[in-house]
Image (cartoon, grey):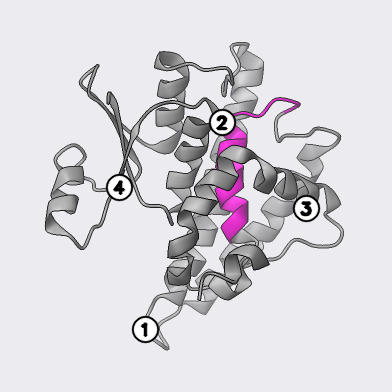
Amino acid sequence: MSLVFYGHPLASFCHKVLIALYENGTPFENRLVDLSDEASRADLFRFWPVGKMPLLRDEARDSTVPETSIIIEYLDHYYPGPVSLLPLEIDRALQVRLWDRFFDHYVQAPMQTIVSNRRRPEGKEDETEVAACKTTLATAYAMIEKQLSESSWISGEAFTMADCAAAPALFYAETLVPFLEEQPKLRAYYDRLLARPSFARALEEARPYFKFYPYHDRLPSRFRNTAG
């Protein structure tokens, strides 16, 4: 198989790319990376010494593609399907890229920092850092609520790369800073993302691993019940 995807089912950034792959039914080999296993680790690091997941390897083009947004744009260009995840028109494409970056930097990043703090030894959490991250998430939620307006998806009526970024970011972030009652558009958007078949598939594949998420008791009930 030409495309090999290196990732882990629990990782939110891996979900982002899996959504893009599943949206278009793109054939690929899903190679699970276990960083505690020397052979698995070496398999990833030989292509990308930084060691970050996800990573896409295109054997047909002898190309190694890191970074989620770059991977999705690569797939959109070289392996297009019925769902175009990046508009051709430049102004619309810039909006998609903006909101893609927004979810990565202002939802994913603070969410991961909070989770990383939870994994530290008792008494070693940086409470100031955690508080700042929660403030960032609250600000991001308010901006998303405003952006959605009457649109079904974050940058308009079409599902795009930005929504691929939004789905896993909001899935985990909501367990840390819940949405407010005054944010009905955000809640409805989140529900649409959960119902999207591509994301539902990624979450189903992650189900056996949710027990390793430090806040698994706050996941949506259908996942929480099998995470213990």
Three-letter residue code for mark 4: Lys
- Distance from the alpha carbon under mark 4 to that under mark 2: 20 Å
Q: Is residue 157 above or below residue 174?
A: above
Which image quadrant: the N terminus? top left
Q: Give left or right: position of 221 versus 45.
A: right
Q: Viewed as shown, does residue 141 lie left or right of 31?
A: right
Does residue 171 sit above or below 17 in this rendering?
Answer: below
Q: Tag 2: residue type?
A: Met
Percent x, y of residue 93:
60, 20
Q: Which mark is residue 121?
A: 1
Which residue does the numbered mark 2 point to in the structure image?
Answer: 161
The magenta-colored residue range is: 156-172
Residue 100 has which mark?
Answer: none
Q: In terms of sequence position, does the residue under pointer 1 or pointer 3 come before the other?
A: 1
Task: Evaluate whether residue 83 shows in this view.
Answer: yes
Verify whether residue 162 appears in magenta: yes
Residues at marks 1 and 3, CA–CA distance in whole angstroms: 34 Å
**Amino acid beneath label 1:** Pro
Q: Closer to the observer: label 1 or label 3?
A: 3
The answer to whether residue 169 is above or below residue 153 is below
Q: Which residue corresponds to mark 4?
A: 52
Q: Secondary structure at mark 2?
A: helix
- In the rendered structure, which disc, 3 or 2, sits on the residue that comes first in sequence? 2
Q: Are marks 4 and 3 in contact (CB under 8 Å)?
A: no
